[in-house]
Image: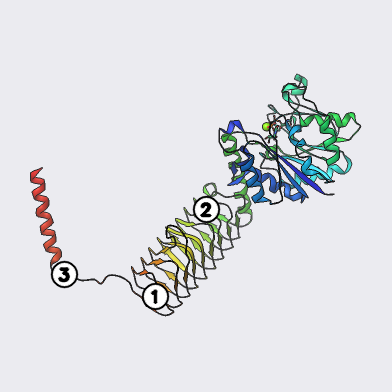
């Protein structure tokens, strides 16, 4: 059976108090919308439709970056959840199969929950995802009759008796596409909010003799984010879960609660992560590496046996081969560091490749930017780059070469050559003594005058 996803993401998210549409706010550095899309991807959807409204262009951009085939529709006025799903009708033209409706601001949904909903579709026409709410607050209430779902009543429209129900509506549903749009056509807006409630499809389906049920998941999965406080709490929940998974996988986290992970961070067994390390999106660390304290990594790959930090910064495109060493106050960007190479202290290596066994001395800088364009630096194998070398790109240093400390390398260095480019030193005997005398008497005169 083929599946299509409809992700509702038109809401403004007033309580976020933000210029950015709510669904683009990140949890674990990935926009909430992308979390929802990734959760839905387990169903291998034939089509994905994102219903946008507030900040439609920005939302569309993020959705397409995740899935270039995502279809974006715009709901100009937010007239309710049924009206939102109705906007997906044209984008689903010609599609036959099940539609699964998700919310863009519910980042914790687990893949098996969606699979259970699809499984329940085998003997039901419409499946709703519900949860037992610790505090049912303003959620829609699921009125059950045995296994059958009779109807969903919104909090605002509920009687006291119905408000006492704790089995609540998550908002997710699964239904055959044709059936769903037929049901939505019959939804009106005669209710306390004057909105077209998607939840009304349940009662309409029942009236038409269709079979409706609710599948249950734990409340944590249906947590929606409505405010910055919710976002922070959701992030904390995500972090706790991701850290626990890494510990289970055999990663050492010396102070787990100080390690900040992204949703896609991958770390191999027997790797040690020291305290206060931040992982941005797109980081893979292989087995047996060490990431020392206070390092910041994003969009990079660290191979087996590498040691990074303390206080290192790996930016997008940093590619560290096995047994490399990246030390304190070193920044690597868009650069391949080959096996066994070392960049141990106070250096910037950007838009570069560094060959195997090469040693980059303290304070070395690849001058990659001329103010307009970026240029590459290519350093061969077993090169010794002396401290405080400036490599003015584009430039190549051949294998086995050396650069003298303080050299400004502006021309290519051939293999095995020594590049020296610095002013000649001159020593003037006794001059320091004279200079000190002169400066001291100058200071004495000034202090007297003051
Ligand atoms: C909805 C459900 C409620 C459920 C709750 C779970 C309805 C009528 N009610 O209520 O039963 O317990 O979610 O969180 O469905 N949206 C649009 N366009 C609209 C309206 C909403 O795209 O016109 C989107 C929102 O951006 C959001 C989602 O749909 O992602 C839910 O809308 P929201 O207004 O939060 O619904 P609730 O009142 O919370
Ligand atoms: Mg809501």
Tell me where residue 398 sits by quadrant. Answer: bottom left
Residue for badge 2: 254
Q: Secondary structure at mark 2?
A: loop
Q: Residue furthest right?
A: 209
x and y percentages locating residue 410 in the rendered image: 38, 69
- Is residue 171 at all visible to an observer of this figure? no
Which is nearer the N-term, disc 2 or disc 3? 2
Q: Tell us which disc is closer to us: 2 or 3.
A: 3
Residue 442 spot, x, y in % from top left = 10, 53
Judging by the rendered image, the residue that carries numbered circle 3 is 428
The local crowd at label 1, few if under 14, some if 14 to 19, many if 20 or more residues have their Cα within 10 Å, is: many
Location of residue 123 with respect to 407 vertically, above or below: above
Q: Which residue is mark 1?
A: 402
Q: Is residue 106 above or below residue 164?
A: below
Q: Are marks 2 and 3 in contact (CB under 8 Å)?
A: no
Rendering quarter of residue 366: bottom left
Comes first in the chain, label 3 or label 1: 1
């Amino acid at each position: 059976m083929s599946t299509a996803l409809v992700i509702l993401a038109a809401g403004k998210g007033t309580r976020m108090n933000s210029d950015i549409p709510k669904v683009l706010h990140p949890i674990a550095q990935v926009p909430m919308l992308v979390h929802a899309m990734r959760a839905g991807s387990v169903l291998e959807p034939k089509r994905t439709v994102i219903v946008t409204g507030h900040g439609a262009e920005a939302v569309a951009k993020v959705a397409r970056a995740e899935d270039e085939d995502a279809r974006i529709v715009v709901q100009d006025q937010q007239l309710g959840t049924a009206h939102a799903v109705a906007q997906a009708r044209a984008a689903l033209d010609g599609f036959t199969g099940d539609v699964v409706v998700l919310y863009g601001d519910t980042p914790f949904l687990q893949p098996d929950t969606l699979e259970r909903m699809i499984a329940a579709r085998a003997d039901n026409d419409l499946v709703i995802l519900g949860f037992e709410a610790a505090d049912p607050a303003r959620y829609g209430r699921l009125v059950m009759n045995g296994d059958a779902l009779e109807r969903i009543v919104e909090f605002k429209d509920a009687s006291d008796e119905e408000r006492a129900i704790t089995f609540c509506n998550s908002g997710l549903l699964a239904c055959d596409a044709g059936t769903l749009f037929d049901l939505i056509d019959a939804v009106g807006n005669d209710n306390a909010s004057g909105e077209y409630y998607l939840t009304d499809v349940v009662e309409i389906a029942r009236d038409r003799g269709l079979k409706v049920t609710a599948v249950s998941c734990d409340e944590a999965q249906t947590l929606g984010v409505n405010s910055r406080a919710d976002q922070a709490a959701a992030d904390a929940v995500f972090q706790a879960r991701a850290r626990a998974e890494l510990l289970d996988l055999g990663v050492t986290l010396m102070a787990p609660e100080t390690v900040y992970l992204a949703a896609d961070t991958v770390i191999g067994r027997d790797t040690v992560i020291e305290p206060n390390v931040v992982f941005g999106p797109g980081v893979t660390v292989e087995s047996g590496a060490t990431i020392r304290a206070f390092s910041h990594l994003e969009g990079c790959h660290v191979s087996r046996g590498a040691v990074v930090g303390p206080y290192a910064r790996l930016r997008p495109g940093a590619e560290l081969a096995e047994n490399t060493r990246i030390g304190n106050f070193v920044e690597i960007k868009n650069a391949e560091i080959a096996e066994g190479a070392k960049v141990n202290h106070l250096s910037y290596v950007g838009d570069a490749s560094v060959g195997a066994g090469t040693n980059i001395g303290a304070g070395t800088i690849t001058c990659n930017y001329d103010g307009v364009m970026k240029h590459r630096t290519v350093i061969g194998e077993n090169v010794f780059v002396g401290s405080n070398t400036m490599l003015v790109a584009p430039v190549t240093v051949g294998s086995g070469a050396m650069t003298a400390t303080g050299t400004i390398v502006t021309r290519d260095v051939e293999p095995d050559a020594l590049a020296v480019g610095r002013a000649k030193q001159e020593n003037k005997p006794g001059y320091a003594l004279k200079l000190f005398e002169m400066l001291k008497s100058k200071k004495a005169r000034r202090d007297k005058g003051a």
